[in-house]
Amino acid sequence: MTAPSGRPTAGAWPIVLLVARREVLTRLRSRVFIGGTVVMVALLAIAIVGYSLVGGRTAAALRVGFTGGSQALEQDFSTSATALGQPVRVTDVSDEAAGRAQVSAGTLDVLVTGPATSPTVVVEQSASGVVQAALEHAVLSARFTAVGIPPGVLETVVSGLQAPVDALQPKKPGMTQDRVVGLGVAILLFITLGLYGSQVAQGVVEEKATRIMEIMLATVRPSRMLAGKVVGIGLVAMLQLGIVAAATLAAVDTTHVLTTPALGATAVLGYLLWFLLGFLLFATGYATLASLVSRPEEVQGAVTPVAVFQIGSYLLAYLALANPSSPIVAIASVLPPFAPILMPVRTTGGDVPAWQVGLALALTVAAIAGLIWLAGRVYANSAMRIGARVRFMDAFRG
C-alpha cells in the first residue's frame, strides 16, 4: 500500500535506521575514520606518557661535595635541603682542586669548601636558592656551636620565622591537572564536532550534486532521510570517541600520572553526553544550511554561521580555563550555541553549580528540538532544488 505521494507508508523509524545503516557502513570503511581513530589514540598515548615522564617525575638528587672543615656541615645541610624539597647526595672530596675539577667535569653539581663557619660554594654557573638556604642554616648551626651555644637553640630561634599565608583564593589541589584535562576536552570536542558536522554538510550537498537524492526521495521522505544521515554519522562519531575515551581511561589507569576526578569514568561519560548533544545541535545546523546549496565548493561558505558559533565556543574555553569565575563564561556556558563545548570544560574544575548544568542541558535539548524541526522543513523544501543557491526564507516558506 502506498501513500498518495507514491512513497511507501512504512513506519518512520525503520526507514531512518535503514538510512543510518547505510551511513554507518560507508563511513566505518573509510580511511578518515580508521586513520583518524589511530592518530587520536596515538597522540593521546604520547601525551599521557610524555606527561608522566616530564610532569610526574620527582626532582633529581643534587650532587654536593664537601672538603676540608666544611665536611662538618654535611648532616645539617642534608636535613635542611630535604626539608625544603630538594633531595641531595652528599660526598666527601679529598681537596678543593679535585672538587673544582669534578664541578667542571659535571660529576658534581656543588662543591662546599673552607671552614665550617665561613665556607665557599663552587658551582658551574649559579647556586639555587634551596642550596643557599640549606647551607646558611648549616653555617648558623656551626657558628652557634663554635661560641658554645647548644645546637638546639638554633631550632628554637629560627622556628616560626616563616609567616603563615592566609590566601583569600587558595589554589585548588590538582588545579593544573584539571586545566590540562579541560584543554584536552576542548580541543577534542572542537575537532570532532567540526569534523563530523562537516561530514553531514558534505554528504547533503554531494547527494544533491550527484542526483542520488532524487532517487532516494522517490521512496523516502526528506525529513526521514536527513534524520537517518544525522543518526548514522552520529553513531560513527560516538564509536570513535568511545574508543578514544576507553584508551584514555586505560592509559591513565596504567600510568597513574593523572589522579584528578576530571578523568574518572563518570566524568568521561559526561563528556560523551555533551558531545552527543553538541553533535545533534551543530549537525542539524550544518545540514540546514548545506541543503541550500548544490555544489561542494559552496559548502564552506554556506555553513559559516554555524562554524562561527563553534569557533567562538572553542575560544571561550580558553577564557574559562584562565578565569573560571568570569561572568561571561558562566552565562555563555548555559546557552545552546556554546554549552556543548564550554560546559564540559568548566566541569573539569568541579566547581559548576548543578542548576547551571541542568539549565544548560535543558536549553540545549530545547534548541536541538527546534533545529530538528527547522532542518526538516528547510531540507524538504530545498532538497530537489538544483542549481543556484536557495534563499533561506524561500526554503522556509516552501
Image (tube, rainbow, N blue to C red):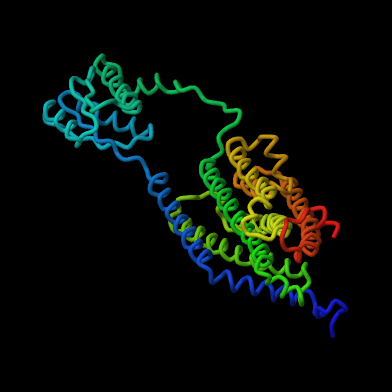
Where does the image place residue 182, in percent across and percent down from the top left? Answer: 57, 46
Residue 273 x %, y %: 66, 58
Q: Nearer the viewer, residue 218 or 195?
A: 218
At 17% from the left and 31% from the top, the residue drawn is: 104
Residue 38 lies left or right of residue 169; in this view the side is left
Q: Is residue 362 left or right of residue 210?
A: right
Image point 82% across, 53% down: which residue? 393
Percent x, y of residue 70: 20, 24
**Total labels drawn:** 0
Which quadrant holds the N terminus? bottom right
Residue that protrudes farthest toward the bottom in the picture = 1
Residue 114, above or below 64: above
Quarter of the view holding residue 271 = bottom right
Q: Residue at x 62, y 61 (%)?
A: 199
Furthest residue toward front: 387
Is residue 330 or residue 31 the one in the foreground?
31
Residue that lies at the very extreme toward the top in this rendered image: 147
**In the image, is 365 to the left or to the right of 122?**
right
Give the position of the C terminus as an image quadrant.
Answer: bottom right
101 or 298: nearer the viewer? 298
